[in-house]
Amino acid sequence: MKGLFITFEGIDGCGKTTQARRTYDALRKLGYLTLLTREPGGTAIAEQVRAIILDPANRAMAWKTELLLYNASRAQHVAEKIFPALARGTVVVCDRFYDATVAYQGYGRRLDRTALAALHRIATRNLVPDLTFIFDLPVAAARARMAKDRKVKDRLEREKNAFQERVRRGYRAIARQARRRCRLVDATRTIDDITRDVLGQVLARVRRGRK
């Protein structure tokens, strides 16, 4: 694969989606072949799976069902969109990927992380991002942002604070364990300050190429 795969991660309300969009826009303006996508979702089939996962009406969904649906969505997304884009030399900017599964289902749901890794190998041939930004924000601050900006919360956003705290700890653990790939970003700063930080690191990596 000739492209570069960059992912944006963090708890709900951390600002990752805004920064993924800003990164995509900046790279396009600079003339880079760039794709912006998201998980769960990214393709017509994967978006249908997303709707099932996040529907607040599906409160009875078993945790293992949730895990398998995420991987089903990811398998379609990677096969139909991400792998072809990387083969074309595209910079793929993705809002969430496998780290989200580790944080939410591994740490949040306390599911077996070895099983999570095995499913990832099946779904994606063990695709690993080249660079990952993890936006770190206290749960209370993230909740306050969502209360202000979102009228309707999805099924995962409605989880209790204790769950969100486990997810945050999971993300921080991932950042420690994968220091070469992951950048832990202080998401309490202003949007513009974060953008300057993130974009500077993205451009340095893009100019260096995929290694």
Image (cartoon, rainbow, N blue to C red):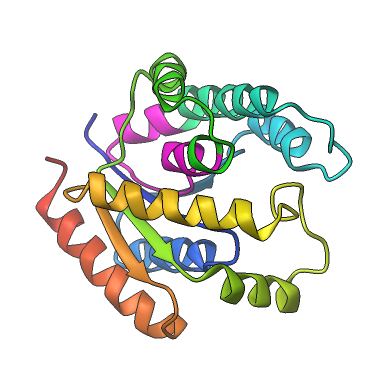
Q: Looking at the picture, tell me which residue is in the foreground, 202 or 103.
A: 103
Q: Which residue does the image show at 42% across and 41% down from the upper left?
A: 99
Q: Which residue does the image show at 29% across and 69% down from the upper left?
A: 199
Q: Is residue 61 magenta?
A: no
Percent x, y for residue 70? 60, 30
Q: How many numbered circles are shown?
A: 0
State which region is magenta.
82-104
Q: Which residue does the image show at 72% across and 36% down from the upper left?
A: 53
Place residue 85 in its image quadrant: top left
Percent x, y for residue 42? 58, 39
Q: Which residue does the image show at 60% across and 27% down from the upper left?
A: 67
Q: Is residue 87 magenta?
A: yes
Q: Up-down: is 78 above or below 167?
A: above
Q: Up-down: is 76 above or below 145?
A: above
> Residue 153 vs residue 114: left or right?
right
Percent x, y for residue 27? 34, 62
Q: Can I make out residue 8 in this image?
A: no
Q: Looking at the picture, tell me which residue is in the foreground, 55 or 103.
A: 103
